[in-house]
Amino acid sequence: MRTISVLGATGSIGTSTLDLVRRHRDEWRVAALTAHGNARELARLAREFGAEVAVVGDEACLPDLREALSGSGIEAAGGAQALVEAAARGADVTVAAIVGCAGLAPTMAAIEQGGTIALANKEALVSAGEVMTAAVAKHGATLLPVDSEHNAIFQCLHGQDMADVRWITLTASGGPFRDASRAEIEAATPSQAVAHPNWSMGAKISVDSATMMNKGLEFIEAFHLFPVGLDRLRIIVHPQSVVHSMVEYRDGSTLAQLGPSDMRVPIASALAWPRRMDTPCEPLDLAKIGTLTFRAPDEELFPATRVARECAQAGGAAPAVLNAANEVAVAAFLAGKIGFTRIVPQCEDVLARGIPPVPATLEDVIAADAEARRRATERLERA
Ligand code: NDP
């Protein structure tokens, strides 16, 4: 039996993870489950899985959580520090599935315990970059990518020599506006933007998919996970989301990982690694799918990948600033405060106002993130 903690248990990735755990109950003991404000659902999950501790990030929701857990014997806690403490209890596997840079400090606390981190929370790695990868090395932790593209690349690299890699190609669905006109994109509403054609995901990543910022963040994520150099990373649009990414080797062989558009596949790959486990996902029916297509990204219409690549090239705190500015802009778009096509220019405006010094510690990253958020919010208020 192995222990598992799920940070962001009530979200899309958290729910898919617990669905797998539910199907293999005799193999897992649940340590910590966390959420932000959804105390009722968190308590329900904590009771179902017999968790040791349940934590809400929003301390104001702690009374609700306590009430919902009363008589269960499950510990309840609330607040940002409580999230870190729950992650610091350690587990054989910690699934990092909080959305946004809010997940960074708990993920780092889990890394410091030296276990296996199944990382969905790409914003944490994008923001902390070398600070996180150095912590993984220092504490002997194992970082397994859950993001479907990175999980695919991880599988394609298994047993290979990094020096033989010619290209790593991240596939992108292109999001809901991949075939839309400029006028349609300019008029895009939040409900259109979150209606992803292939994947069912949380609101923030769905908007990121629509702007292609998700692929930009994934480009930076890949840069840290697979150190082949920026000039060997590229992006291709693949509307069917069947090929989850590819690695081309110097002899001309390309290895690709294919699978259904169901996050339980990469999550299962991380949970069972280096073995395999059953999932309830439909087998891939390639005859039914029939055609797989690929095309180059349109960076005129979707500039986010260009902006992210420039941030990766700039290095230091630039990716943290981009991520923070994007989080603020996406929240403003979802709240109806800015139009869809303002999201990426808003990030560029914040980046143009200066990049803090290269972060050396977690505190530096958190400070760069906070300053970028302050600037992004100020910029929005002025606009
Ligand atoms: P969701 O919005 O569905 O879930 C987010 C989870 O994080 C919820 O449990 C939420 O709690 C919690 N949370 C939100 N804000 C905070 C906060 N400030 N402090 C602590 N906890 C918080 O997101 P997803 O599951 O879609 O995405 C999670 C991560 O996984 C993201 O980084 C995303 O990029 C990545 N990812 C997601 C994929 C997907 O298919 N969904 C695919 C690949 C990567 P509550 O419910 O209480 O609000």
Image (tube, helix red, strand yellow):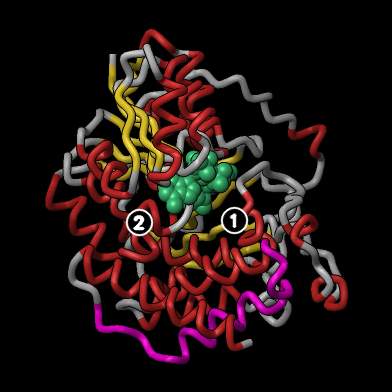
| Residue 55 image position (x, y, % from top left) | 36, 35
Tell me the number on the disc at residue 225.
2
Q: Residues within 10 Å of mark 2 (few under 14, many from 20)?
A: some
Q: Which residues are magenta?
A: 335-358
Q: Is residue 22 above or below residue 253?
A: above
Q: Position of residue 82 (x, y in %)?
A: 28, 42
Q: Report x, y in % for residue 91.
A: 25, 29
Quadrant of the image containing the N terminus? top left
Reply above or below: 184 against 21.
Answer: below
Q: For residue 5, which quarter of the picture?
A: top left
Is residue 111 part of the magenta span, yes or no?
no
Q: Amino acid at mark 2?
A: Leu
- Going 38% across and 44% down the picture, which residue do you hit? 59
- Can residue 147 be seen here? no
Image depth: mark 1 or mark 2 in front:
1
Q: Which residue is mark 1?
A: 204
The structure residue drawn at horizontal position 17% and vertical position 46%, both measured from the top left corner, is: 112
Spatial CA span between label 1 and label 2: 22 Å
* SS category of the residue bearing label 1: helix
Q: How many numbered dots are placed on residues in this image?
A: 2
Question: Residue at 57% of width from left, 37% of height from top?
Answer: 263
Q: In the rendered view of the protein, which quadrant contains the C terminus?
A: bottom right
Which of marks 2 and 1 precedes in the sequence?
1
- Are dots 1 and 2 in contact, CB under 8 Å? no
Residue positioned 48% across, 33% down in the render: 39
Q: Is residue 361 visible?
A: yes
Task: Give the amino acid type for the residue marked by disc 1 in the picture.
Answer: Lys
- Characterize the local packing of mark 1: few (<14), some (14-19) or many (20 or more) Cα atoms within 10 angstroms: some
Q: Quadrant of residue 189?
A: bottom right
